[in-house]
Image (cartoon, rainbow, N blue to C red):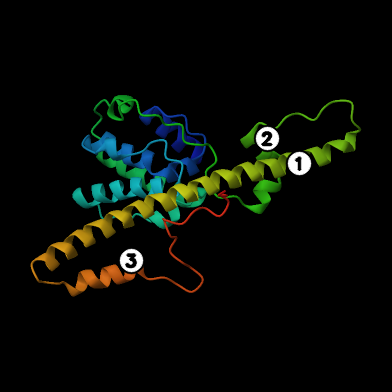
Amino acid sequence: MAALSRTDLLTWVNELLQLNYTRVEQCGTGGAYCQIFDSIYGDIPMTRVKMNAKHEYEFVANFKVLQNVFKAKKIDKPVPIEKLVKCKMQDNLEFLQWIKRFWDSNYGGQGYDAVGRRRGAPTDTPATIAPLTGPRSASGLGAAGRSGGKTPISGHRAGSTQPNEAMQNLQTQLRDMSTHMEGLEKERDFYFAKLRDIEILVQQQVEALERSGQQDEALKEIQRILYSTEDGFEVPDSTAQPEDEETF
């Protein structure tokens, strides 16, 4: 059977899941993949799937759900998470084509309430997720398509719109970089919170062992790793005053 085109696949995904995806790359968030398998089996934990994921660490969490599904259903197919979460067209197109073939072979024809299964969770995944690339950012289409750039003010000479387009492109890149930075900050906070939970748990276990006159070398080694520093990096002193705070 011939592989479906991007347009055909998007039409199928949107009709099955009641979405409004415009690019195959949007499947790189992992949410649609998870719900396609839910349409087959009906028991995927959709409450753990973030359909409007916007950051890579959220995409990875969705794909972890998908990996668990593959393991539970004994589906012998590697999930190339590292590639798919980059939201590149070719990688996601190939994976989606495989999923469509799997769905055709395993879907029982039962009705599927996509909105109900995700409990009305928002699905406003951005139309363009892939990281910035030079050619894309430099094109006028990139600025107009993503930022709704304003039409140059009329009355200028024909050639005078070029600087305006360049400015719009720079503004678009700045907005995309700000969004990317926000994502990195959230990802940092996400993993820092996990490390903090590990630190507290280890500390509690160490103190409990010390009270009973025992110790655990593995826990001590974990603490050593947690508290180790590198040249040029110092652990912030939480008791110190901010540098920009003046006292009188």
What is the C-alpha distance between the residues marked 2 and 3? Answer: 47 Å
Quadrant, the N terminus: top left
Q: Whole-percent x and y of residue 82?
A: 42, 57
Report which residue position mark 3 lands on: 226
Q: Amino acid at mark 3?
A: Leu
Residue 94 percent across, percent down from the top left:
44, 50
Name which of mark 1 and mark 2 comes first in the sequence: 2
**Residue under the image location 40 percent in, 45 percent down:** 96
Q: CA distance from mark 1 to mark 3?
A: 45 Å
1 or 2: mark nearer the eye = 1
Report crowding for label 1: few under 14, some 14 to 19, many 20 or more residues within 10 A (C-alpha): few
Front-most of residues 170 and 144: 170
Q: Is residue 94 visible in this depiction of the protein?
A: no
* Secondary-structure class at tag 1: helix
Give the left or right position of residue 14, taking residue 168 as reference: left
Quadrant in the picture for residue 100: top left
- Which numbered disc, 1 or 3, marks the residue that appears first in the sequence? 1
